[in-house]
Amino acid sequence: MGNPWKKAASVAELGQLTADWLEGRIRTSPMNVGDSGPDEETRHLIPVLAACNRAGCVTSCSQPGMVDRGQHWEQRAAIEAWVADKNLLDRIRTSAKRAGIEVIAHRADSGWRDGEVVTRVDGEPYTWFGRTMGRRGQIAYEWPGVGGRAVRELRTATYLTLIDPVWGRDNVLWPALANAIRG
């Protein structure tokens, strides 16, 4: 079968492959080490994430909102994705803003951006979303081994980050995203 990611010719094809990986039909993904599939904490999000990818909003990272007081761990619901379709991008932005979700959208060729803290451990920053490292660096980091035609389309896509501003909340971002991709 070879590397299906290498054969991807568009952002839409990357979305289909990502949905297949989320649902277990493909064992590997450029964004993940090994072949274990999505993290356990993300399993309940697979239906909306797969639908999002099939609609053309290609996810590269996501996390649910949660608080684990025993581990002193808290995170905000967040997602990072690439969107080449302007109409889809507009629908996602509108739906997210209506729900009170923070929207960060920029082209992959923008310069360095620190991003927003989405995970804290013992009150200290641990994970950031919305970081960028420039066009080539961002794409090379997130999409190693992907076909050249898909990479060229990623270079013109919008790098989108959605972050729920409320720590631990997991029931606002995902319905807003699902509503946007349904059209």
Image (cartoon, rainbow, N blue to C red):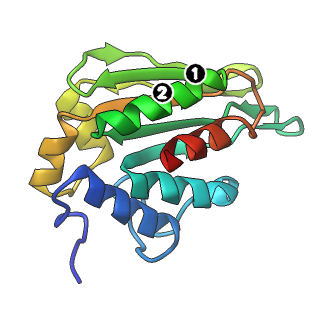
| Left-right relation of 170 to 60 | right
Identity of the residue drawn at 64% across and 43% down: 174
Mark 1 is on which residue type?
Answer: Lys
Q: Helix, strand or loop at disc 1?
A: helix
Q: Please, is residue 40 above or below residue 164 in the view? A: below
The residue where tag 2 is placed is: 93
Q: Please, is residue 122 above or below residue 50 in the view? A: above
Q: Please, is residue 147 above or below residue 110 in the view? A: below
Q: Please, is residue 153 above or below residue 7 in the view? A: above
Who is closer to the viewer here, 70 or 52? 52
Q: Position of residue 8 (x, y in %)?
A: 20, 62
Within 10 angstroms of label 2, few (less than 14), some, or many (20 or more) residues? many
Based on the displayed image, in which of its 4 quarters is residue 40 positioned?
A: bottom right
Q: Position of residue 88 (x, y in %)?
A: 39, 39
Identity of the residue drawn at 61% across and 43% down: 63
Residue 109, visible in the rendered structure: yes
Who is closer to the viewer here, 71 or 100? 100
| Left-right relation of 94 to 81 | right
The residue where tag 1 is placed is: 97
Q: Which mark is residue 117?
A: none
Residue 101, visible in the rendered structure: no
Residue that extends furthest to the bottom in the rendered view of this protein: 1
Is the residue under label 1 in contact with that under label 2 (CB below 8 Å)?
yes
Q: Position of residue 24 (x, y in %)?
A: 50, 74
Within 10 angstroms of label 1, few (less than 14), some, or many (20 or more) residues? some
Q: Helix, strand or loop at disc 2?
A: helix
Mark 2 is on which residue type?
Answer: Arg
